[in-house]
Amino acid sequence: VVTAPNAIDELFELSGRATGDYVELLPVDPFYRLVWPDGVTLEYNADADAVSSAIARISPRDVAGYRKFLEFSEAVFRAGYLELGTVPFQSFWSMMRVAPQLIRLRSDRSVYSVVSDYMQDPHLRQAFSFQSLLIGGNPFHVSSIYALIHALERQWGVRFPRGGTGALVRAMVRLFQDLGGEVRLGCPVQEIRVRNGRATEVATADGRSVVVDAVASNADVVHTYAHLLAATDRGKAVAKSLTRKRFSNSLFVVYFGLKRQYPEIAHHTVLFGPRYRELLDDIFDRGVLPDDFSLYLHNPSRTDPSLAPPGQAGFYALAPVPNLGKAPIDWSVTGPRYRDRILDALEKHTLPGLRA
């Protein structure tokens, strides 16, 4: 789900290039189709009138509340994304300088709490709070600043790279190489070496040592400090501090190809389970794998037919699960069973004839 294509465009523009010369970002419409076990469905996109009409079919009394929530989301988007989105908060005091602004944005409250101020229907409260799960945040915990995602999606749309996400990766690799960068694959990093408080070398698994001016690590932040910087006092201290924090969820994903197409299935479908708050409590707080699940169903060949042979389709189904490092789940045993439960549920409710 590419929800900020402007950021990708900016990267290419700063490099003196155009995104379109490297990759095509296709529009996705609707952004999402949301489906509940009781048969209620909701589709939404950037058309506020169309979304209001869809909401009216579910809960007429919540249309006005949605319009007010949209105003709130756009206000948070302007302040929290356009103004503060590129501000580095590297100390307590840098955060305190913008505290009044954050308080006005009601950032001390959760996404779900603020959405509930505007809409009463439980389906709609789920529909406009689940987006924080896209960044691994529990909507009952994370700041209401993440309500800006709704406005962000309306501002630039939801896109999908022609050729799949891999095509976007390949485009960025090509841009990096065109600018003189060198990419080394199959070259695991073992250690970031530090001298006088600065990263000076990167040691790799094949015994090489690369002298560097600076290092950017996009590995998991706990892994970076606990393993790559394990030989440093700061690495040990930060790793210890990080492990005490609240962790995001992990994801269980089932990829499957089908010999037929399901043209009625949207590109992005969210299949809510029978529970919402309780399910997220199990995943985020209790660290247990629930018996029920909510699913995100991805049907990319709906937007880009080239991703599957003619007349066929490629899907994946994604379920939020407890954090891999925090929950004692043996996925070598649990994984195949969980996969089969997901496929069974999809065949029963969403993709008839799936197993065939």
Image (cartoon, grey):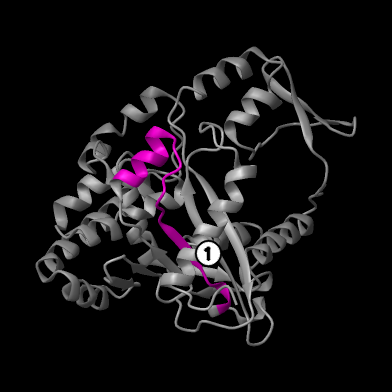
Which three-letter amino acid code belongs to the residue tagged 1? Leu
Instruction: Say which element carries label 1.
Output: helix
Identify the image quadrant of residue 11.
bottom right
Please check the rendered image and state whether residue 280 is part of the magenta-colored stretch, yes or no.
Answer: yes
258 vs 184: above or below: below
Quadrant in which the C terminus is drawn = bottom right
**Residue 310 percent across, percent down from the top left:** 67, 87
Please check the rendered image and state whether residue 68 is part of the magenta-colored stretch, yes or no.
Answer: no
Q: Residue furthest left?
A: 61
**Residue 245 percent across, percent down from the top left:** 44, 26
Q: Is residue 7 visible?
A: no
Left/right placement of residue 312 relative to residue 204 reads left
**Residue 316 percent across, percent down from the top left:** 56, 64
Q: Nearer the viewer, residue 278 or 186?
A: 278
The residue to which callout 1 is attached is 343
Name the residue: 68% across, 63% down.
Answer: 166
Q: Nearer the viewer, residue 80 or 206?
A: 206
- Residue stretch rendered in magenta on the structure: 278-301
Name the residue: 55% across, 74% down.
Answer: 354
93 vs 299: above or below: above
Left/right placement of residue 285 relative to residue 172 reads left
Name the residue: 62% across, 25% down.
Answer: 225
